[in-house]
Image (cartoon, grey):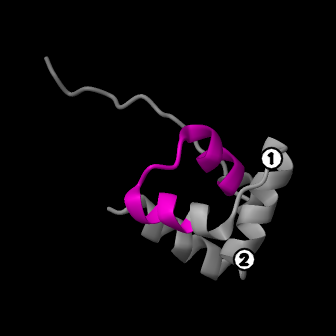
Amino acid sequence: MNLGNEIKKLAIDNSVTLTYLAEGISRKKGKRYSVQNLSAKLKKGTANLNELVIIMEILGYKIKFEKEISTKE
């Protein structure tokens, strides 16, 4: 699974552009964040967790960590 592709699919499904995502990240982080930077990070898979949380918030999702139940006996 490529995280960048999944985020792009979610953005399309929610009628959100990468420009809108980059602007939202800029507002949340308080510093300039370009579309080119976002696109490169999604393509390379180098977006950090903070950026991913912001992206998911903009798209109306949240990231949830859930412990997997082990079947070891």
- Residue found at x 66% / y 48%: 62
Quadrant of the rendering where the N terminus is positioned:
bottom left
- Residue found at x 39% / y 59%: 44
Residue 48 included in the magenta stretch of the image: yes
Work out whether 48 lies above or below 41: above
The dot on residue 31 is: 1
Amino acid of disc 2:
Val
Q: From the viewer's perspective, is 30 left or right of 58?
A: right
Q: Tell me if mark 2 has few (under 14), some (14-19) or many (20+) residues whose alpha carbon lies within 10 angstroms of its own.
A: some
Sooner in the amino-acid sequence: mark 1 or mark 2: 2
Magenta region, main secondary structure: helix
The dot on residue 16 is: 2
Residue 19: image quadrant is bottom right
Number of numbered tags placed on the structure image: 2
Chain part drawn in magenta: 39-55
Q: Secondary structure at mark 2?
A: loop
Extreme residue in the top direction:
73
x%, y% of residue 15? 72, 82
Cα separation, mark 1 vs mark 2, equals 21 Å
- Residue found at x 72% / y 77%: 16
Amino acid of disc 1:
Lys
Residue 67: image quadrant is top left
Q: From the viewer's perspective, is 71 left or right of 46?
A: left
Quadrant of the rendering where the C terminus is positioned:
top left
Residue 71 included in the magenta stretch of the image: no
Observer-nearest of 9 and 31: 31
- Residue found at x 45% / y 49%: 46
Q: Secondary structure at mark 1?
A: loop
Q: Tell me if mark 1 has few (under 14), some (14-19) or many (20+) residues whose alpha carbon lies within 10 angstroms of its own.
A: few
Residue 11: image quadrant is bottom right
x%, y% of residue 40? 49, 64
